[in-house]
Image (cartoon, helix red, strand yellow):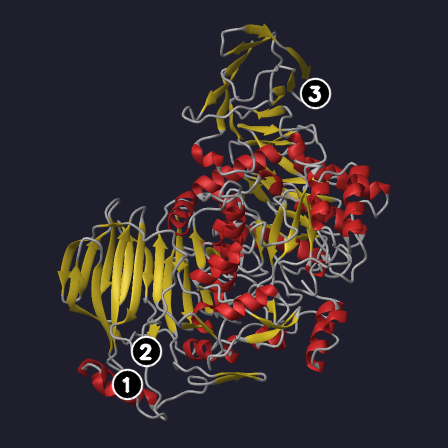
């Protein structure tokens, strides 16, 4: 997201040049602005270590076992530095491994606030022990941990199978904190314990081999002072039997992660990357250090809880082998087991890793959710369509665009305002000329049951006439420089300060600024967008904050990837507080970390109007869903550049079936409201947006399920078909829940697509034509510009609302149509979830949750939550049964015992029965019998 040239005229010439590039949208990413591993001293240093025998040895005589954990010292035989290993068995089939210095010179950073609680433990027990190691029971299913002493190694086993090994390649590294040799001695050092002194003496040899970048590092014109010296950590994990690994977003890459042997590792370091490049491991806006591994037997996960810059190397013994090569191995009886090796390298902090042992994909989602929480339950309206651009010019522009949707009969729920709506890029303000009466504007939207999102970025204009700046300054809330002054950098307002969101008092103050009496002009239908929160610093190293800046008691080096997480946390809390805790918030963030799912939605950032960017939106959102962040979308139409009409229509058709559905565009692009491309294209866009609205009951139900379980809303096929290798690398199609399969058209000029329909005994129904197709096949589907291949799984029941109105709120009391797709056993099952759509009252059991099922020609609605209380005015106006036989009669029996005959139609050509106007309340018990 980018700013107006006029506001920047007074800035330094270098900055003006940078911004001109940013705004023009004509240049792609300048890779030279961002480090490679070779340019990142700690990554280069750690990557230079090659697999071999580890210098680390476990001192078994130091082992202590309590009810909650095992502790054990490790020693590096090269420098005699002692480490402390802590091993925990956690509830839910999770193993936690922590490694820290036994006696660090100063505390090392341990990530707070990401875990929703201290994870509950279960007792470990020793099965056997000798001088070579110890074997510990992990409880159920013959699971155990083998701790080998020389060299140190951990193996997690189940029966005879090794599930995962740690340090099996000897790449554990832990750079201990030390005194710099060429500085004067710390006066307090003499008073330290003898053990510390000994530690320093023993490390002298190592310090003679000081490498470039250990104590100071320069990238381009920026110098990182590194006052604590080298502090990197590294650990390798081996995954026998695994060829497919996923996760560690955010990267513009395929769903299945690639090996990195011949290039850079995947990088996790939140950065504002202008016009990012596709299919490479460069860092982007967010970082979730979670990887999933999957094969036909098991799914496992690794959660590396570290907020510093991190690089992840992946290698595989099957990488590069062709299908023929693998067949040859099989024919020749090759006994080599596939294996993927993963190595995590972080600049600072400690090793704190959670090993999630599955065994199923849904077990791993549950395990991760037990650690970091689930996706927040969004307001129903936020699942509708969002209209955005940088920027709607003024209140009259907003009124005109709003009216245009009504004139062209296209529903929408949110219209968005970018940075130009503010008074000179001062957030929490309005331009006094263009947006002089914001409450009048908001009331006009509210009268139509619509809402607005306004941007609030975390860089604060340094201006003594700006209330927000003055308060932050007077309270000492800004991030500090290494020398103790307030850190300042360039961003949209010009010179800007950055609040220290790692501090609870700063977050509490920020949240209070969203109160209606603080945020002038705001109303309850105004929501928030946090952009630029990596944080983006235009004149900083890699367009971000200096690593030696100070947040709380820590360097940005330690906490960097948490900044956006904390900004969204504080903003979300502010929106909740302003309603007295009653209303669910909606907050979109660009930067994120593990746990960000608890606070709202994310999008894939500043993409471009290109076909490949449309394609990449699918694996990018799938990867986020796998690590807990389900509320994901991409800028429909592309942010930079201008799409042709075919690309724009195809992007709407794709975005309508992704969780967060927002069109957005750059300041310099031509306007692209949906009705500006001729009647034919307007009709195509109208149709797919209206399709989105018919499916809102299903989307809402899926998000409720995600909120309860941690399972992704938009998910790869292998999640539901974990034993079908044909699904493992698919990332051009996806499932919504388990019952809708979507294969968007993402190729220019496409006349057909080939979709894989999974499930050997499954059937799938085209939602548009109701044609039935068998599973376990690649199906070629001819397409026209009106086509988006979507299939409903046989055996499912999906509720829809087919009376589409101007916004989701206008449809609240409208009736439902149930789409019942029979499987080969002629049964089907689904759910219906209803609440008020916007408050937290669902937590007080104010909702309807019903199970719908059809078996033996009897369709029933049964209460899944008898202790819940909620009423609805909505009723069932139609039931469409796909794959059905013609009944002779259909009888409805309601909860009060009343029976009535229902009218029905039968389409013999498609085997579809339609029950018309059954009329029962959507929250009631009822039975429909087909005879």
- Residue sitting nearer the eye, 686 or 820: 686
Q: Which residue is mark 2?
A: 176
Q: Position of residue 681 (x, y in %)?
A: 81, 43
* In this rendering, position of residue 386 left or right of residue 61: right
- Residue count near mark 1 (Cα–Cα under 10 Å), binned few <14, some 14–19, many ≥20: some
In the rendered image, the quadrant that contains the N terminus is bottom right
Count up the numbered dots. 3
The answer to whether 137 is drawn above or below residue 148 in the figure is: above
- Disc 3 or disc 1, which is closer to the eye? 1
Q: Which mark is residue 909?
A: 3
Do the numbered discs 3 and 1 sit on residues whose CB atoms are within 8 Å?
A: no
Q: Which residue is mark 1?
A: 203
- Residue sitting nearer the eye, 432 or 248: 432
Q: Position of residue 761 (x, y in %)?
A: 51, 31
In the rendered image, the quadrant that contains the C terminus is top right
Do the numbered discs 2 and 1 sit on residues whose CB atoms are within 8 Å?
A: yes
Q: Which mark is residue 91?
A: none
* In this rendering, position of residue 894 left or right of residue 117: right
Residue at left 74%, top 57%?
A: 391
* In this rendering, position of residue 431 left or right of residue 824: right
The answer to whether 810 is drawn above or below residue 147 in the figure is: above
Real-space Cα separation, disc 2 to disc 1, in angstroms: 9 Å
- Residue sitting nearer the eye, 539 or 436: 436
């Amino acid at each position: 997201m980018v700013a107006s040239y006029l506001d920047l005229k007074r800035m330094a010439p270098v900055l003006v040049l940078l911004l001109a590039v940013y705004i023009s949208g004509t240049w792609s990413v300048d890779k030279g602005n961002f480090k490679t591993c070779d340019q990142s001293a700690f990554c280069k240093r750690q990557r230079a270590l090659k697999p071999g025998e580890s210098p680390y040895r476990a001192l078994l005589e130091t082992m202590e076992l309590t009810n909650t954990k095992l502790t054990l010292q490790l020693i590096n035989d090269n420098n005699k530095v002692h480490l402390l290993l802590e091993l925990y068995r956690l509830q839910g089939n999770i193993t936690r491994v922590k490694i820290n210095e036994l006696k660090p010179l100063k505390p090392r950073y341990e990530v707070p606030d990401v875990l929703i609680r201290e994870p509950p433990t279960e007792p470990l027990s020793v099965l056997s022990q000798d001088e070579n190691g110890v074997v510990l029971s992990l409880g159920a299913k013959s699971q155990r941990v083998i701790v080998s002493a020389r060299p140190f190694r951990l193996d997690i086993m189940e029966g005879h199978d090794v599930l995962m090994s740690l340090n099996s390649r000897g790449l554990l590294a832990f750079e201990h904190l030390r005194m710099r040799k060429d500085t004067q001695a710390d006066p307090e050092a003499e008073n330290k314990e003898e053990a510390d002194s000994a530690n320093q003496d023993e490390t002298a040899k190592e310090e003679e081999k000081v490498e470039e970048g250990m104590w100071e590092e320069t990238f381009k014109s920026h110098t990182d002072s590194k006052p604590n010296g080298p502090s990197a950590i590294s650990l390798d994990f081996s995954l026998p039997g695994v060829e497919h690994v996923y996760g560690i977003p955010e990267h513009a890459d395929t769903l299945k992660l690639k090996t990195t042997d011949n290039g850079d590792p995947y990088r996790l370091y939140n950065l504002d990357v202008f016009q990012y490049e596709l299919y490479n491991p460069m860092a982007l806006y967010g970082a979730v250090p979670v990887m999933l591994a999957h094969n036909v037997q098991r799914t496992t996960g690794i959660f590396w809880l570290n907020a510093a810059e991190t690089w992840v190397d992946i290698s595989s013994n099957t990488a590069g082998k062709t299908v023929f090569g693998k067949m040859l191995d099989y024919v020749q009886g090759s006994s080599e087991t596939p294996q993927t090796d993963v190595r995590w390298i972080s600049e600072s902090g400690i090793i704190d890793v959670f090993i999630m042992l599955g065994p199923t994909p849904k077990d791993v989602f549950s395990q991760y959710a037990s650690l970091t929480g689930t996706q927040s339950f969004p307001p129903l309206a936020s699942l509708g369509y969002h209209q955005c651009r940088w920027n709607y010019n003024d209140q009259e522009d907003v009124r005109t665009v709003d009216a245009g949707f009504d004139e062209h009969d296209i529903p929408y729920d949110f219209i968005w305002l970018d940075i130009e709506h503010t008074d000179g890029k001062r957030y929490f303000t309005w331009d006094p000329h263009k947006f002089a009466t914001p409450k009048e504007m908001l009331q006009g939207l509210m009268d139509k049951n619509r809402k607005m999102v306004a941007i609030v970025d975390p860089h604060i204009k340094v201006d003594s006439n700006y209330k927000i700046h003055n308060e932050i300054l007077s309270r000492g809330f800004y991030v500090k420089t290494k020398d103790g002054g307030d850190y300042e950098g360039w961003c949209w307002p010009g010179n800007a300060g950055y609040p220290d969101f790692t501090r609870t008092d700063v977050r509490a103050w920020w949240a209070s600024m969203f109160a209606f009496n603080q945020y002038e002009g705001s109303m309850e239908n105004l929501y928030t967008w946090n952009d630029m929160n990596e944080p983006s610093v235009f004149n900083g190293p890699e367009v971000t904050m200096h690593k030696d800046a100070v947040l709380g008691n820590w360097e940005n080096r330690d906490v960097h990837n948490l900044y956006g997480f904390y900004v969204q946390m504080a903003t979300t809390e502010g929106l909740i507080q302003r309603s007295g805790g009653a209303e669910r918030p909606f907050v979109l963030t660009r930067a994120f970390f593990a746990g960000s799912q608890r606070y709202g939605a994310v999008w894939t950032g500043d993409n471009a109007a290109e076909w490949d960017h449309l394609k990449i939106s699918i694996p990018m959102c799938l990867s986020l869903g796998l690590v807990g962040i389900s509320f994901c979308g991409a800028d429909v139409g592309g942010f930079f550049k201008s799409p042709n009409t075919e690309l724009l229509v195809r992007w709407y058709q794709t975005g309508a079936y992704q969780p967060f559905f927002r069109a957005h565009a750059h300041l310099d692009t031509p306007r692209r409201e949906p009705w500006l491309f001729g009647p034919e294209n307007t009709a195509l866009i109208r149709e797919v947006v209206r399709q989105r609205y018919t499916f809102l009951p299903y989307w809402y139900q899926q998000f409720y399920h995600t909120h309860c379980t941690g399972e992704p809303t938009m998910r790869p096929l292998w999640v539901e078909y974990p034993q079908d290798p044909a699904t493992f690398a698919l990332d051009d199609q996806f499932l919504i829940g388990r019952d809708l399969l979507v294969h968007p058209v993402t190729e220019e000029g496409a006349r057909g697509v080939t979709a894989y329909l999974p499930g050997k005994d499954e059937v799938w129904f085209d939602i548009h034509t109701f044609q039935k197709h068998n599973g376990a096949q690649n199906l070629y589907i001819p397409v026209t510009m009106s086509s988006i291949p979507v299939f409903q799984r046989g055996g499912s029941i999906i509720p829809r609302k087919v009376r589409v109105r101007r916004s989701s709120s206008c449809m609240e009391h409208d009736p439902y149509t149930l789409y019942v797709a029979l499987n080969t056993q002629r049964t089907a099952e689904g759910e219906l979830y209803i609440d008020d759509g916007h408050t937290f009252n669902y937590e007080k059991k104010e909702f309807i949750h019903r199970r719908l099922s059809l078996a033996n020609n009897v369709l029933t609605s049964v209460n899944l939550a008898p202790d819940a209380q909620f009423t609805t005015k909505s009723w069932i106006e139609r039931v469409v049964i796909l794959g059905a036989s013609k009944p002779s009669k259909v009888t409805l029996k309601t909860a009060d015992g009343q029976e009535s005959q229902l009218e029905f139609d039968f389409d013999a050509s498609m085997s579809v029965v339609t029950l018309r106007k059954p009329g029962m309340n959507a929250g009631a018990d009822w039975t429909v019998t087909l005879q």
